[in-house]
Amino acid sequence: MPPKPSQAATSTPSGVRVRIRARRLALYTVLVSVTGLFLGPFGWLVLSGLKTQGELAASPVHWLPDAFQWHNFADAFDQIDFLGYARNSLVIALIYATLVTLSSAWVGFGFARLDAPGKKVLFGVLLGSMMLPQMVTLLPTYLIFAKLGMVNTYWPWVLWGLSAAPYLVFLFRQFFAGMPRELEEAAIVDGCGYTSIFWRIFLPQSWPVLSASFIIAFTWTWGDYIAPQLLLSTDRTTLAVAVMTAYVNEGGTPVPELQAAASVMYVVPILLIFLVAQRGFVAGMSTSGLK
């Protein structure tokens, strides 16, 4: 016997709600699993910083410490000039991130809004340079800086910042290419040149890509180990190098629990920067691919 109209009307929404809840549950399960997959290494790093050296070397794996060794963080902070190395990292990262963001925006504006013979070929060569690994260019770069007397100074990061970065140029080029042509034409009618158009119109409207570019460049430099190790002396090196090389005992053997604790303190500033600026970062990464 077919259900009455009133029964059919009430049963259908209930079934739809069940399916929606099941889909949401499945989606949340996947999201929680992926989040745990990404947070797992950081959680293990935090636990490693709270263990003793014997617990870290135990076999089979000692998952949780018998007693949390909170003093590892204080010891890691006091054993080296932690704030001094962090200051060096901050100065270098700010110099490079600021300069490379502005230079990449300028180059991306040129590729997006100016016409010139061979522009597409040059843009293809620029993108192709991203395929070159850092180790290929590091030795010639070091020899050049050594000849110029720039080793153990911050000038290499200034020059790297002024030379723009191919990936960031691509982000800015994609963003600027999607802006209306009428803005540019109206500015030209009012007597603005392309330099004024860039600084007064295009750059102020590109804050999502600016924030994304700055965060990417900052994390690149903050996490770089090879270039500071090669170009800077021990007292001027960065926190990344100090965390990997400075925590040793009298016999020159690394102290893993202090390295783990220092690594946690080393990672936290980057996490805080991303949490504060994540809205602009996500907006920049999403809008830079749209026309």
Image: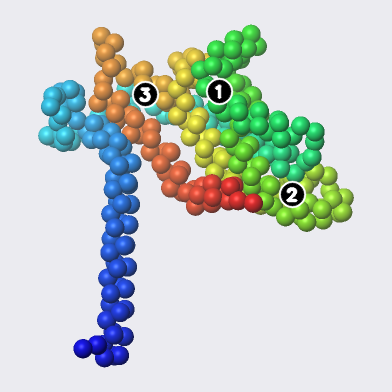
Residue drawn at the location 16% of the way across and 34% of the way down: 63
C-alpha separation, residue under disc 2 versus residue under disc 3: 43 Å
What residue would you read off at disc 1?
132
* Quadrant holding the N terminus: bottom left
Q: Nearer the viewer, residue 205 or 53?
A: 205
* Residue 59: % across, % down: 13, 24
What residue would you read off at disc 2?
200
In-image side of 192 versus 238 (left or right): right
Residue 48 appears in the figure: yes
Numbered-mark total = 3
In-image side of 105 versus 233 (left or right): right
Residue drawn at the location 23% of the way across and 35% of the way down: 47
Residue lying farthest to the front in this orientation: 1
Residue drawn at the location 54% of the way across and 46% of the way down: 285
On residue 243, the disc is 3
The crowding category of the residue bearing disc 2, from other C-alpha atoms within 10 Å (few below 14, some 14 to 19, many at least 20), is few
- Of marks 2 and 3, the one in the foreground: 2
Residue drawn at the location 68% of the way across and 39% of the way down: 108
Amino acid type for the residue under numbered disc 1: Leu
C-alpha separation, residue under disc 2 versus residue under disc 1: 35 Å
C-alpha separation, residue under disc 3 versus residue under disc 1: 28 Å
Asked whether the beta carbons under mark 3 and mark 1 sit within 8 Å of each other, the answer is: no
For marks 2 and 1, the one nearer the N-term is: 1
Element carrying mark 3: helix
Residue 146 figure quarter:
top right
On residue 289, the disc is none
Element carrying mark 2: helix
* Residue 145: % across, % down: 61, 13
Residue 254 figure quarter:
top left
In-image side of 125 versus 254 (left or right): right
* Residue 245: % across, % down: 36, 17
